[in-house]
Amino acid sequence: MRKLIGFLLLLFPLATHAGAQMYEPLSASVRASLYKAVSDNVPRRTSFSSAVEEQNWLAEMSRRMEKRIPDQSRRLDFLKSVHYEASRAGLDPQLVLGLIQVESGFKKYAVSSAGARGYMQVMPFWVKLIGSKENNLFHIRTNLRFGCTILRHYLDIEKGDLYRALGRYNGSLGRPEYPTLVVGAWRNHWAYNTPSTRISSQDDKHPTS
């Protein structure tokens, strides 16, 4: 499996594999819960457990991302936003970085052939389902908020099965290529040993159909 992941990442180092979340009817309770999750405007608080953790994580991730986002101020704002929104949704921030690498190649204004938008390639129908007309999916915090909320939703549906949740996110459920690429990017490029890892080992399962 490691050899396959390495081969795929070597073959497509800069390629993006944006898919399209598929529209599925939501119950009123789920829709209300997701709406609350994306519209919560409580004043932002740090998602780090300490100032030292924040400094260390930002320094390491900034170093790894320097070539992708050369401007330091923009890079740090992006990383802080990823960490905050991922942690808020109960996700590992490094997993989200891996997903963004595969989905958009860290291109803020990326648009897929299916119409998915932004860093996390969110389909516009989500704005109609759980957002409001003011939501701009090219806005960094809005895109990350929707993307992390949607991935968390799919993880809950799949009872923690990360590969199936990623398949739903990409619109390729049942096929291993996309989950393999995301997990490979997560482990090989963004893995970071920290007590603040949010996703449990139960979520990291092998591909299933």
Image (spheres, rainbow, N blue to C red):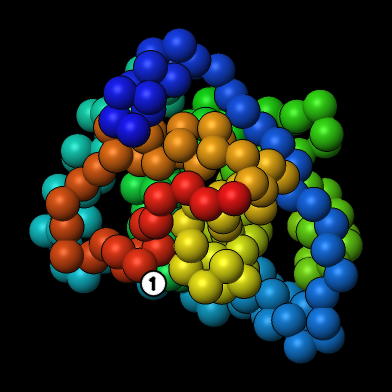
Residue at the front extreme of this rendering: 209
Q: Which corner quadrant of the image does residue 69 belong to? A: top left
Task: Name the residue located 79 percent from the left edge and 59 percent from the top edge.
Answer: 126
**Which amino acid type is shown beneath numbered disc 1?**
Arg
> Relative to residue 43, is residue 24 drawn left or right?
right
Task: Name the residue located 15 percent from the left edge and 51 percent from the top edge.
Answer: 193
Residue at the left extreme of this rendering: 52
Q: Of residues 90 and 57, which is closer to you in this image?
A: 90
Residue at the bottom extreme of this rendering: 29
Q: Badge 1: few (under 14), some or many (20 or more) residues near its Cα, within 10 Å?
A: few
Q: Is residue 173 among the parts visible in the rendering? A: yes
Q: Is 7 located above or below residue 49 in the figure? A: above
> Relative to residue 51, is residue 86 drawn left or right?
right
Task: Name the residue located 76 percent from the left edge and 88 percent from the top edge.
Answer: 29
Quadrant, the N terminus = top left
Measuring from the top left, give residue 77's x and y in whole percent.
Answer: 42, 45
Picture mark count:
1
Q: Is 178 located above or below residue 130 in the figure? A: above
Task: Name the residue located 51 percent from the left edge and 41 percent from the top edge.
Answer: 179
Measuring from the top left, give residue 8's x and y in whole percent.
Answer: 44, 20
Q: Secondary structure at mark 1?
A: loop
Q: Is 136 located above or below residue 138 in the figure? A: below
- Would you name the residue on which mark 1 appears? 45
Measuring from the top left, give residue 38's x and y in whole percent.
Answer: 66, 69
Q: Which corner quadrant of the image does residue 37 belong to? A: bottom right
Residue at the top extreme of this rendering: 11
Q: Which corner quadrant of the image does residue 147 belong to? A: bottom right
Measuring from the top left, give residue 43's x and y in whole percent.
Answer: 50, 75
Q: Is residue 78 among the parts visible in the rendering? A: no
